[in-house]
Structures are given as structure tokens and as C-alpha cells.
């Protein structure tokens, strides 16, 4: 077994979980598109589902903080499809 500090192992586990979650989301997205659902509808419902869950788990203040963080990331271009890394 790997001999890593607990915090490093936890980070690896979290990264793997995020990768699997991304794969599930991509598969669901592709299924929706193949069923004729527009990307805008898929995106809006994904965001609404995620925000509903965050409010349920952590409350409205946390969800608002997350929205603010996402806004800054959008403004910095993090989510552009054709980003250029400098």
C-alpha cells in the first residue's frame, strides 16, 4: 500500500472522486444531447440541481459564497472552452 501522509491520500481520493463524477456528468450530458435536449437546458438544470443540493447541505450563505467564487472564476476566463494558458 502507498505510504503517504493522510492529507495527501485524502487529496488523491478527492481528485479521483472528482474525475469519476466528471465522467458521470459527461455521460449524462451526452445522453441528454442525444435525446434532443439543448445544452442550455442541460446547463441550467445542472446548476439548479447543484445549488439546491448545496443549499440543503450547507445553507444559503455558503451557496451565495460559492456563486460569488464562480463569478470571479468566470470573469478570469477559467471556463472558456478555448483558453490559452500562458
Image (cartoon, rainbow, N blue to C red):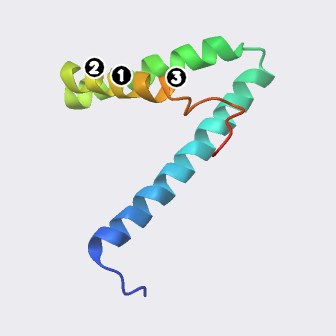
52 horizontally vs 1: left or right: left
Element assignment for label 1: helix
The image's mark for residue 46 is 3
The answer to whether 67 is drawn above or below residue 11 in the figure is above
Q: Marks 3 and 1, how far apart in space?
A: 14 Å
The image's mark for residue 64 is 2
Q: Residues within 10 Å of mark 2 (few under 14, many from 20)?
A: some
Query: Which of 65/53 is in front?
Result: 65
Most extreme residue toward the front is 86
Q: Residue at x 50, y 29 (%)?
A: 76
Q: Residues within 10 Å of mark 1 (few under 14, many from 20)?
A: few
Which is more N-terminal, label 2 or label 3? 3
Q: Residues within 10 Å of mark 3 (few under 14, many from 20)?
A: some
Total tally of numbered discs in the picture: 3
Residue 60, position as x, y percentages in the image: 22, 19
The answer to whether 20 is drawn above or below residue 35 in the figure is below
Q: Quadrant of residue 9?
A: bottom left
Q: Residue at x 47, y 57 (%)?
A: 15
12 horizontally vs 65: left or right: right
Q: Marks 3 and 2, how far apart in space?
A: 17 Å
The answer to whether 41 is drawn above or below residue 80 in the figure is above
Q: Quadrant of residue 39?
A: top right
Q: Which residue is mark 1?
A: 67
Residue 69, position as x, y percentages in the image: 36, 28
Q: Residue at x 56, y 51 (%)?
A: 20
Element assignment for label 2: helix
The answer to whether 68 is drawn above or below residue 83 in the figure is above
13 horizontally vs 27: left or right: left
Residue 42, position as x, y percentages in the image: 62, 18
Element assignment for label 3: helix
- Tags 1 and 2 touching, CB below 8 Å: yes
Amino acid at each position: 500500500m502507498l505510504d503517504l501522509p493522510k492529507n495527501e491520500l485524502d487529496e488523491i481520493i478527492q481528485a479521483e472522486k472528482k474525475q469519476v463524477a466528471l465522467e458521470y456528468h459527461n455521460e449524462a450530458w451526452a445522453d441528454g444531447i442525444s435525446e434532443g435536449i439543448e445544452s442550455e437546458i442541460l446547463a441550467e438544470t445542472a446548476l439548479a440541481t447543484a445549488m439546491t443540493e448545496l443549499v440543503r447541505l450547507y445553507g444559503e450563505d455558503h451557496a451565495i459564497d460559492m456563486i460569488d467564487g464562480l463569478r470571479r472564476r468566470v470573469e478570469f476566463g477559467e471556463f472558456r472552452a478555448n483558453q490559452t494558458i500562458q
